[in-house]
Image (cartoon, rainbow, N blue to C red):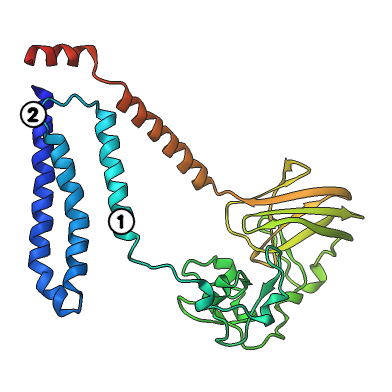
Amino acid sequence: MREENLRRTATWLVLLCAVVISAGFLRFRPRLMELGMSRHYATHRFLLELIPLLAVAVWLGLPRRRDSAPAVLGGILALALMQRGFEAGEVYPTIPARAFYPPLDLLRSIPKGAPERVSAIGFSLVPNSSTLYELEDVRGYEALVLARFVETYPLWCVEQPVWFNRVDDPQRPFLSFHGIVERGAERARDSDSWTPNGEGAARILQYTGQNLRIQIDARSPTVVATSIPAWPGWRVTLDDRPIAIEAYNRAFLSFRVPSGHHQARLWYWPKGFSDGLWITGITAIASLVLLFRGPTARSRQNMSRLG
């Protein structure tokens, strides 16, 4: 009895959604026609939303069905995925990238998948275009920016609000800074207090956007500096042992290594991402347990009495 009531309620709710969608379509169809949408296209889009709802209502309304809750939810999910596939699959037709961004001989010599960065002058090759050509553009293209990195802008670019940073002079000395490593609250006040770096050589073994492996041969204790902005969440291991990350040139990552032969790995894994994985995993497991546990003995007893 209780299961039949739940099915009846769910059926009426689905039908109510269908009525609301139908009413909205009839209400706004004249306006869609005024905007130039064809009658056939508007009707087609409307039916893609209406037919799955009617199918669910018919399925739930069939008499004396004893489908389990997982089967019902799985069927509804499959219908929803099919509906979204048919509806959204026609919104953005696929067009080859070369139709808008053809290959350029000028850019062929820049290695892909390597720490090779570019910057165009002025408004040439805005960074969004650089991404489509798989180039790492130092000018950036995001609204959320590291505060320390912003402090370096006057040294090498002209800031463009909520866009990218315009480079007008490629000869600015930004890349030839003297290295200053910050340790806690200590600051270098003048050039006489700078500490010379040790001698060594570094070779990149693997490079991706969030993972970097380096082979290091240091003749003496040295600081290995990178041009990676020092966002919180970067981690580094030296010979598979975690070590501390320090700031270099105010806004970039560096780390110290002793003399000798070493391998270092840098990767981006913020703590918030780990916390989110734990929360998502626990929630998914709890949901599955509640879904497949089935009715308790007490609820089965109550249902048998109602029957």
| Image-based side of 2 in relation to 105, left or right | left
Q: Closest to the observer: 44 or 207?
A: 44
Residue 286, position as x, y percentages in the image: 36, 29
| Image-based side of 162 in relation to 175, left or right | left
Alpha-carbon span between mark 2 and mark 1? 32 Å
Q: Residue at x 69, y 85 (%)?
A: 170
Dots 2, 1 in contact, CB < 8 A: no
Check disc 2 and give the amino acid type: Asn
- Dot 2: element: helix
Q: Residue at x 67, y 78 (%)?
A: 107
Q: Which numbered tag is attached to residue 86?
A: 1
| Residue 89 appears anywhere in the view | yes
Residue 242, position as x, y percentages in the image: 71, 43
Quarter of the image with the C terminus in it = top left
- Dot 1: element: helix
Q: Residue at x 13, y 16 (%)?
A: 303
Check disc 1 and give the amino acid type: Phe
Q: Closest to the observer: 68 or 172?
A: 68
Residue furthest right as drawn:
219
Quadrant of the image occupied by residue 222: bottom right
Residue furthest front as drawn:
40
Quadrant of the image occupied by residue 22: bottom left
Q: Closest to the observer: 141 or 56?
A: 56
- Crowdedness of circle 1 by 10 Å Cα count: few (<14), some, many (20+)? few
Quarter of the image with the N terminus in it = top left
Q: Residue at x 54, y 78 (%)?
A: 101
| Image-based side of 2 in relation to 103, left or right | left
| Residue 150 appears anywhere in the view | no
Q: Which numbered tag is attached to residue 5?
A: 2
Q: Of callouts 2 and 1, which one flags the residue occurring earlier in the amino acid sequence?
A: 2
Residue 34 vs 95, above or below: the answer is: below
In the image, which is nearer the foreground, mark 2 or mark 1? 1
